[in-house]
Image (tube, rainbow, N blue to C red):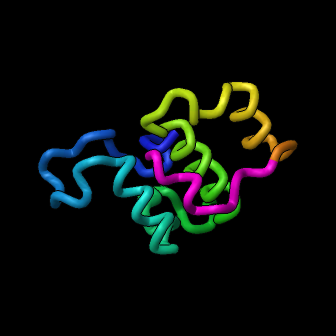
Amino acid sequence: MMEIVCGRKAIEPTKPPEEISLVNWVLQGFKNGDLLQRCDTRISKEELVAREVFLVLKTALLCANRSAEARPMIKKVFQYLDGTESLPLDKSFFNGV
């Protein structure tokens, strides 16, 4: 999901050190409050729906947790994405990424 929304590969060795890992780069954007700046610039701003981008990228961060036990089950991922379940709001929930 992150690769699609951000328009880049999971690992980009030619990027600056803080941007090499897509997961770490998106996580920093989440923590810094500039998550939308991580979106692919080829996505037209008219098409960009902030709420949906946040939803997809936050869900992707949950799925990227280092601990398999902390990752959501696929059923929960679908519930997050279709809006029947709320994403955790606490930033500490993303510490395992």
Give residue 90's position: percent from left, percent from top: 64, 62
The residue located at (46%, 59%) in the rendering is 39
* Number of numbered callouts drawn: 0
Residue 13's image quarter?
A: top left
Dominant secondary structure of the magenta stretch?
A: loop
Give residue 72's position: percent from left, percent from top: 64, 33
Give residue 63's position: percent from left, percent from top: 54, 36
The foreground one among 10 and 39 is 10
Q: Is residue 45 above or below residue 59?
A: below
Q: Is residue 21 left or right of residue 53?
A: left
The foreground one among 69 and 87 is 69
- Residue span colored magenta: 86-97
Give residue 20's position: percent from left, percent from top: 22, 50
* Residue sitting at the far right: 84
The residue located at (52%, 66%) in the rendering is 36
Q: Is residue 45 left or right of residue 86?
A: left
The answer to if 88 sits in the magenta stretch is yes
Q: Is residue 7 left or right of residue 82?
A: left
